[in-house]
Amino acid sequence: MTHKLVCGNRELVLDRTKIMGILNVTPDSFSDGGMFRSVDAAVAYAQAMVLDGADIIDVGGESTRPGAKPVCTKEELRRVIPVVEELVKRISVPISIDTTKPEVAKECLRLGATMLNDVSGLGDPHMRKVAAEYNVPVVIMHMQGTPLTMQSDPQYKDVVSDIAEYLLLRAAIARQAGITQIIIDPGIGFGKNLNDNLQIIHSLSRFQTSYPILIGVSRKGFIGTLTDRPVEERLYGTIAAVTACVLNGAHIVRVHDVKECRDGVRVADAIKNGGYA
């Protein structure tokens, strides 16, 4: 099945793996916190990612790294609104807003963002109402606990089955709320230990339902554990993990290093499809 996403006046046909470029406008994200706190720096970086091959830009104003404390709505709006306002004018690809707050989502969608990425799995009925009102593609992610607590002691009976069941349930609830464009994300690193993450990637095909799959492995802790590399030295491990995700069925990969991962994605897609068109 070839999925299609309608993002405002743009269509994304998922006939090849799409790349979502990460734009964190936060002081404390685990990998790039504080790097793009000025609007000009954030916009320039987003433009560079688009030139490097990003199909979507995902803007986040609140860190979801393990142990992160929540920020208030006012502060998150202060961080993301000026960036979204400028990106709408300057880039040609869909803009996604990475938030758990309905107020932030609504304001960004009003300004012209055309995708919603909710790490809390669209659990808030107000968020579901906003998503349905704007009729945008929505990423429903699995997370056990909250960013502050999620890595304390994650437990599953069967990590793949448990997460797949959760995502299908949340997707059904979203559909009941009038949301028609749903993307599922198993949530690598969000309340998972090393082997949980590896099992999810290995068994990604088990998540293939009627919904496209997004996955984010970029620079994450499991790569650091396997390679004994700090965050800034995890590029090669990231490309390997992204390649595995593509071969196992991912439709969208969320990454920091767009240019480098684009090459890995392009090769993996050609191998998976048995040819290049």
Image: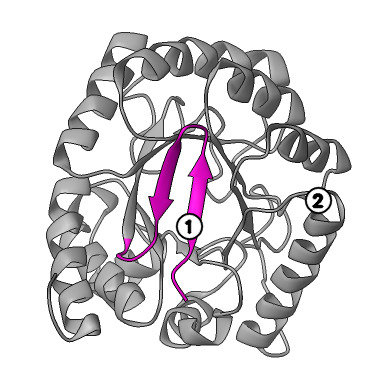
Residue 255 image point, x, y percent: 32, 51
The residue labelled by disc 2 is: 123
Q: Residue at x 67, y 72 (%)?
A: 154
Q: Residue at x 26, y 55 (%)?
A: 230
Q: Is residue 60 above or below residue 244?
A: above
The residue labelled by disc 1 is: 4
Residue 147 image point, x, y percent: 64, 49
Residue 97 image point, x, y percent: 54, 33
Q: CA distance from mark 2 to mark 1?
A: 24 Å
**Which residue is at the front of the view, 167 or 175?**
175
First in sequence: mark 2 vs mark 1 = 1
In the shown orientation, is residue 166 left or right of residue 263?
Answer: right
Residue type at the position of mark 1: Lys
Are dots 2 and 1 in contact, CB under 8 Å? no
Residue segment shown in magenta: 1-17
Of tags 2 and 1, which is closer to the observer?
1
Would you identify the image quadrant in which residue 18 lies?
Answer: bottom left
Q: Callout 1: helix, strand or loop?
A: strand
* One can see residue 155 in this view: no
The C terminus lies in which quarter of the figure?
bottom left
**Which residue is at the front of the view, 17 or 141?**
17
* One can see residue 149 in this view: yes
Residue 229 image point, x, y percent: 23, 61
Q: How many marks?
A: 2
- Is residue 9 in the magenta section? yes
Q: Callout 2: helix, strand or loop?
A: loop
Q: Residue at x 22, y 47 (%)?
A: 258
Q: Residue at x 39, y 69 (%)?
A: 222
Residue type at the position of mark 2: Gly
